[in-house]
Each structure stands twice: as C-alpha cells, then as structure tokens.
Image: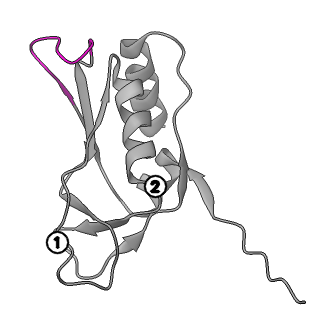
C-alpha cells in the first residue's frame, strides 16, 4: 500500500496575520466576568466559516478570551485553526492552518508593548 502523508502547515498567529495583512484587535472589557476573562481578541474586518464550499454555512462570530491580552490572542488562535477566514473586503476565503500562540513574558501589558515594538522595527 502506498501512503502519502501530508503534514499540516504550521505557523504562529503573528506569521499568519503578517502573511494575510490582518490586524488583531484586543478589547479590554470594563468588568471582569467569566472567570476573569477580561480581554477579547479577533482579526479586524474578518469572519470565520466552517468551510469554503457551502453557501449555506453561516459565518461565525469567533473571539478569543483571556485574563491577559496574550491569553486572549492565544485562545483566538486555538479557536480559529483549521477553519476558513473571510475578509469582509475580499472575495474568497483563506484556509487557516495549525496556529501557535504568542509566548508570554508573564505581564499582559508588557507582552503587548513588546509586540508593538517588534511591529515597528
């Protein structure tokens, strides 16, 4: 028997966002709710679908939640991997590969500052 093993593509959520020119939005909730999950993260102007071939497939609102901004981004990465991303301004969809989160330094604020500094280099 012949076996053709196809390894799933893998990248960080940062690499995926850069590759597709996406902007991550992180919103701070005014009140700590849901077990201290104060932050929400999502790609701006995008929707998520289960597949790219069914017009009956409803787009889903998918967000990441976390106690820190980095936890929210990493949760978002877990929630969207292997689904399809639809940019509201474009036609077509993008298959989302296996995504890895961002490594945290422990302080949510410092993590975001580090990401912004890295982006501006």
The quarter of the image holding the N terminus is: bottom right
Q: In x, y percent, where is residue 103?
A: 56, 27
- Residue at the spot x=47%, y=62% of the render? 82
The answer to whether residue 29 is left or right of residue 41 is: left
- Residue at the spot x=52%, y=37% of the render? 101
Q: Main secondary structure of the magenta part?
A: loop
Determine whether 72 is above or below 104 in the image: below
Q: Residue furthest left?
A: 30
Q: Residue furthest right?
A: 1
Q: In x, y percent, where is residue 119?
A: 43, 38
Q: Which mark is residue 111?
A: none
In what element is the residue under mark 1?
A: loop
- Residue at the spot x=26%, y=84% of the render? 54
Q: Residue furthest front?
A: 1
Determine whether 98 is above or below 73 in the image: below
Foreground label between 1 and 2: 2
- Residue that badge 2 annotates: 81
Circle 2 Cα neighbour tier, 10 Å, few/some/many (<14 / 14–19 / ≥20) = some
Circle 1 Cα neighbour tier, 10 Å, few/some/many (<14 / 14–19 / ≥20) = few
Determine whether 57 is above or below 82 in the image: below
- Residue at the spot x=22%, y=59% of the render? 46
Please give the count of numbered marks on the rendered protein.
2
Which region is colored magenta?
27-36
- Residue that badge 1 annotates: 89
Q: In x, y percent, where is residue 63?
A: 26, 42
70 or 112: which is nearer to us? Answer: 70
7 or 73: which is nearer to us? Answer: 7
| Real-space Cα separation, disc 1 to disc 2, in angstroms | 21 Å
2 drawn magenta: no
> Residue 50's quadrant in the figure?
bottom left
């Amino acid at each position: 028997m012949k076996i053709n093993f196809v390894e799933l593509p893998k990248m960080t959520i940062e690499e995926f966002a850069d590759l597709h020119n996406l902007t991550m939005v992180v919103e701070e909730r005014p009140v700590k709710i849901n077990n201290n999950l104060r932050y929400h993260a999502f790609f701006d102007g995008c929707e998520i679908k289960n597949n790219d071939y069914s017009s009956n497939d409803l787009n889903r609102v998918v967000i990441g939640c976390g106690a820190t901004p980095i936890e929210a981004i990493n949760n978002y990465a877990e929630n969207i991997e292997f689904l399809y991303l639809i940019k509201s301004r474009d036609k077509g969809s993008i298959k989302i590969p296996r995504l890895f989160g961002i490594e945290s330094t422990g302080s949510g604020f410092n993590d975001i500052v580090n990401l912004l500094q890295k982006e501006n280099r």
